Amino acid sequence: MASAHYADADLTVYTKVAALAQRREMCTASVETIASFVALSKSAVERALRRLGNASPDDGVVEVFTRRRTHHRSGTGRTAERWVRDLADTPHEHWVWLPVATCEALSPRLLRLYAALAYATVRRLPVTCAELGNLLGVTERTTRGLIDRLEDLGWINVHRRAGFRGRHRYEVHDRPRQPVLPALGSPEGDDGSGPDAGDGSLAYKEDPLLNDPEKTQVVRGVRHRRDTGGEAVDNPPPPRRAAGAQRRSGSAYIGPPLSLSPRVWASLEPVRDLLPGISAFLLRQAAREIGAQLDTYATPERIAARITWRRAGLDGGRPHNSGAWLLHAALPRWGCGLIACESGWLWETGRRCAICEDLAAARPPPAAAPLATPAYTPASRPEP
């Protein structure tokens, strides 16, 4: 399907026929039925089947085979039987498995882009927007818009500048992810309405008593300063500290009491025994960091597992400075720019991160340590 001979709709029809051909009786759906499945017109499906049934001008390969059928007794026509060629047994064949739902949920052009990204993900190819545009036959700017559209639908995640040499890293999903909804009461950027403050609707009428120039009285006058008299203002100096008195340090915290949400408490479960020795200031900063991670990508289980793993690497399991260790060593996420990466491992699947492996392979090997030159020892003087 990477050939320019095939149209975008050909991949949609091919995917549906390949899925229906997995049955014992192959694909026996009519053209109208296939068109209703993939939301295309009947003529578009017929043209796609015609191109797929003919030999490709590039390699002479037929993608879809068709066999006409008739009833044995009456001789009337029946729906044709269709199937696709076996790709697994073909050597040096570029192919990738696709979910059947993609051909029904995505437009033909988005499906072709999704297939290209899925192939690049499986093969670990760091593709660019220009290369994807050459495959789709569109400009690079149009390709970026299609990628954004595919990401908005939830079929992929784009980790920008997280791949090899600053390229985008694409994460392809088998089913669309639920998009993140805006927070309740947040203003929208598409219209002029303000945020929902919970105190009633915004004013949309003008008050004539305040905006009518005939009824608004203009106050004219002269501004006078307050008469303080001819005497100087007496500003007593602040009381001085007694000789030998020192500035008070280490005063007790007099601010509001610290309160943590249940999600933050669940994240700090592995270090609950260390919390009494952490100051309220550092613990409040740690709670803000945990809340920011929970609101963007992490879960309490993921943060708790990260803290547990890093505490296990300490001697005795207790850091020298609990607050600094929690804030600067236990909470930050280590790894590449991929959000799912945790120190070189993917959190959801438990597999090695491909980006970290690529970066480690591209990193030059450490220089060998120079050989130590043996110290010069002068020969002892021979005895007479």
Image: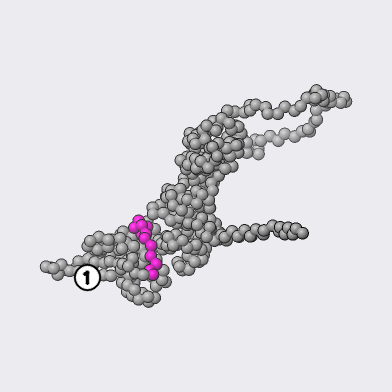
Which residue corresponds to the image point at 55% horizontal and 33% vertical from the top-left?
274
Asked whether residue 47 appears in the rendered view, the answer is no
Of 93 and 367, nearer the camera is 367
- Would you place residue 89 above or below residue 334 in this image? below
Label 1 sits on a secondary structure element that is strand
The residue carrying mark 1 is 68
Position in image of residue 214 (x %, y %): 65, 37
Q: Check the picture and name the quadrant holding the C terminus.
A: bottom right
**Percent position (x, y) of residue 131?**
49, 66
Q: Is residue 318 visible?
A: yes
Q: Position of residue 57 (x, y in %)?
A: 37, 76
Is 240 left, or right, of 130 in this rendering? right
- Residue lying at 43% horizontally and 49% vertically, measured from the top left: 350
Residue 329 at x, y = what percent?
A: 57, 43
Depth check, front residue: 231 or 9? 9
Viewer-proximal residue among 310 and 384: 384
Q: Which residues are magenta?
A: 92-103
Q: Residue at x 31, y 67 (%)?
A: 86
